[in-house]
Structure formats: structure tokens, C-alpha cells
Amino acid sequence: MEDKSGMGAFFPLFMAEVRRRLLDESLPRLRKCLHLLPEDAVWIRPNERANSVGNLVLHLCGNARQWLGAGLAGRPDERNRDAEFQERGPLPKAQLLELIDETEKMIQAVLDEVQPEQLTAVHAVQVFEETGIAILVHVVEHFSYHVGQVTYFTKAHLDVDTGYYEGLNLNPRQPG
């Protein structure tokens, strides 16, 4: 079959990396932090300008639905971004974990449906016009950024190591 997109080997490699970063790293880390945190900690705001872990979960799920679901896959955009930050909880952790599960299923479905030509096409998302590549990069970096905030809060609040790299020697030049 002739490659009319000009993507060659790039497309499967890029999509595999997007999957790895979202499905194998960010979402499991988000879940791990929620499991570690007690219910009452999920809605703590360090100050009025900071968001709680609960707000960040709502925000990440809303962003993924809007950018991937609506922007890239053309599904209806039903996001209320302001509500993600206005929520004060306490929505139970179980409800947030269900939302993460639903979001993961949507992400998997969209990534399964993406065709090479969608990566270079321009899509309307929020108030922007973005290529499919830009949308995928945005969602990956957005998850990474906010999951980092959730991780920091979890470590600071509980004084724990999240164990993301447990069992791996990250200093291979030094004795393990």
C-alpha cells in the first residue's frame, strides 16, 4: 500500500510514544497518587490561587476530552473548563478514579482511530487552530505537567516516595 501521508515510519513510532507517555506513565501515576492520598487531602488547596489534586484530575480529564475527543476526533465538545477549577469537593476519590478510567478509554479509542493524515491536518480546538501533531504533543505535555504537580503535592503532603522507578537502576554507570 502506498503511503500518501508522507508519514512513513514516523506515524507508528509517534503514536506508540504518545500511548506510552499517556497510558503507561501519566495515567498510572495519577491513579497511584490518588490511591496514596487520604480522601480529605484530595481537595486541599495550598492557597486560593492553587488547585487541589481533585481540581487537577477534573482539569486533565476535561482537557483530554476537549483536545483529543472533540479537537482531534470530532466528538461533541461539552467541556466546562471553569467548573474544573471552581469545584471544591469533596467528590469522592472513587468518582475521580472512575473519571480517569472513562478518560483512559476515550484516549485509547481516539488513538486507535487516528489516521496519519489527521496529524498534519488542522483542527479547531478551544479557540485555537492546531495540527493533529500539536494536539497530541499538547495533551502529552499537559498531562506530564499536571501529573508532576499532583506528584509533588503527594510527596510533600505524605512524605513518601511514589516509587515510579522502583526496581530500575537509573544510574547504570554506577554500581546498582
Image (tube, rainbow, N blue to C red):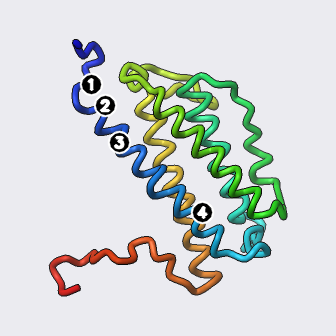
Q: Position of residue 84 (x, y in %)?
A: 75, 50
* Residue that badge 2 annotates: 11
The number of discs equals 4
Q: Position of residue 58 (x, y in %)?
A: 70, 52
Compare marks 4 and 1 and give the one earlier in the sequence.
1
Residue under the image location 44 percent in, 55 percent down: 24
The disc label shown at residue 31, or none = 4
Residue type at mark 4?
Arg
Mark 4 and mark 3 residues within 8 Å of each other at the beta carbon: no
| Gap in angstroms between the C-alphas marked 1 and 3 | 14 Å
The disc label shown at residue 67, or none = none
In the image, farthest residue toward the left: 173
Q: Residues within 10 Å of mark 4 (few under 14, many from 20)?
A: some
Mark 2 and mark 1 residues within 8 Å of each other at the beta carbon: yes
| Gap in angstroms between the C-alphas marked 2 and 4 | 29 Å
The disc label shown at residue 16, or none = 3
Residue under the image location 44 percent in, 34 percent down: 134
Say left or right for 49 vs 173.
right
| Gap in angstroms between the C-alphas marked 2 and 1 | 6 Å
Residue type at mark 3?
Ala
Q: Quadrant of residue 168?
A: bottom left
* Residue that badge 1 annotates: 7
Q: Is residue 138 above or below residue 37?
A: above
Tell me the quadrant of the picture where the N terminus can be found: top left
Compare marks 1 and 3 and give the one earlier in the sequence.
1
Q: Residues within 10 Å of mark 1 (few under 14, many from 20)?
A: some
Compare marks 2 and 3 and give the one earlier in the sequence.
2
Q: Position of residue 133 (x, y in %)?
A: 41, 32
Q: Quadrant of residue 5?
A: top left
